[in-house]
Image (tube, rainbow, N blue to C red):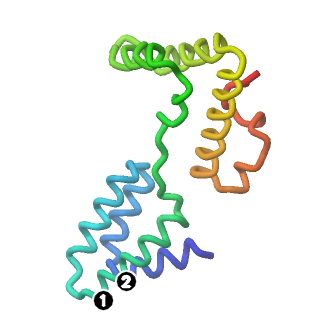
Amino acid sequence: NLEHYCIKNIKNVIGETNFNTLRGMYMDTDPVEQIETKFHELVAHLSEERERLLADHYGVFCRKIFRLVHFEPTDLTIWLTSKQKLALGEMIQDPDVNDTQIYDKMYEFYMNTTGEAKEEARDIIESGCRHFIAHMFGDDNAEVPISQYLCFSLQ
């Protein structure tokens, strides 16, 4: 199993205590950038260049195994007009507006989109959902028809 390979080798290079720090961040679903920063900080403190190179090598490989890749939710909104993005931005800044209201507004924008723009929006959202599912649950799960997931129904 590649996950066990990564765990064993990263522990050997950076030590169990440092590994447990990273594992805690991963389990707490800290942002990828914070985990990467902490990893590089820990690697920088290794005493030998050989260890630092080895840790970097394992880091590049293992971040793919543990799916530590950047996912940018704004990629799902590139189909919105500037005016729609501005309206959503204002809602996000308003402490009295909750996530459900924001998602409802996005869905309203989607439902009011027509023609080729709606087809493009559907493609972008479905592709983004597949990317997110693959990132979180594995490539095999991303191949399941998108309609089986709880992404809103795009008709």
Left or right of 70: which side holds 111?
right
Q: Nearer the viewer, residue 100 or 110?
A: 110
Q: Above or below — where is 93 with respect to 131? A: above
Q: Above or below — where is 137 with respect to 129? A: below
Q: Position of residue 72 (x, y in %)?
A: 47, 41
Is the residue under label 2 in contact with that under label 1 (CB below 8 Å)? yes
Q: Residue at x 75, y 50 (%)?
A: 143
Rounded to the nearest angstrom, the CA distance separating label 1 from label 2 is: 6 Å
Q: Secondary structure at mark 1?
A: helix
Q: Above or below — where is 115 with respect to 58? A: above
Q: Which quarter of the picture shows residue 39?
A: bottom left
Under mark 2, the amino acid is Leu
Q: Nearer the viewer, residue 59 or 100?
A: 59
Left or right of 45: which side holds 127?
right
Q: Which mark is residue 54?
A: 2
Q: Residue at x 36, y 14 (%)?
A: 90
Q: Which mark is residue 154?
A: none
Q: Position of residue 34 (x, y in %)?
A: 32, 53
Q: Residue at x 25, y 86 (%)?
A: 49
Q: Residue at x 62, y 18 (%)?
A: 110
Q: Nearer the viewer, residue 77 or 134?
A: 77
Q: Which mark is residue 50?
A: 1
Q: Which quarter of the picture shows residue 129?
A: top right
- Figure quadrant of the N terminus: bottom right
Q: Above or below — where is 4 with respect to 41? A: below
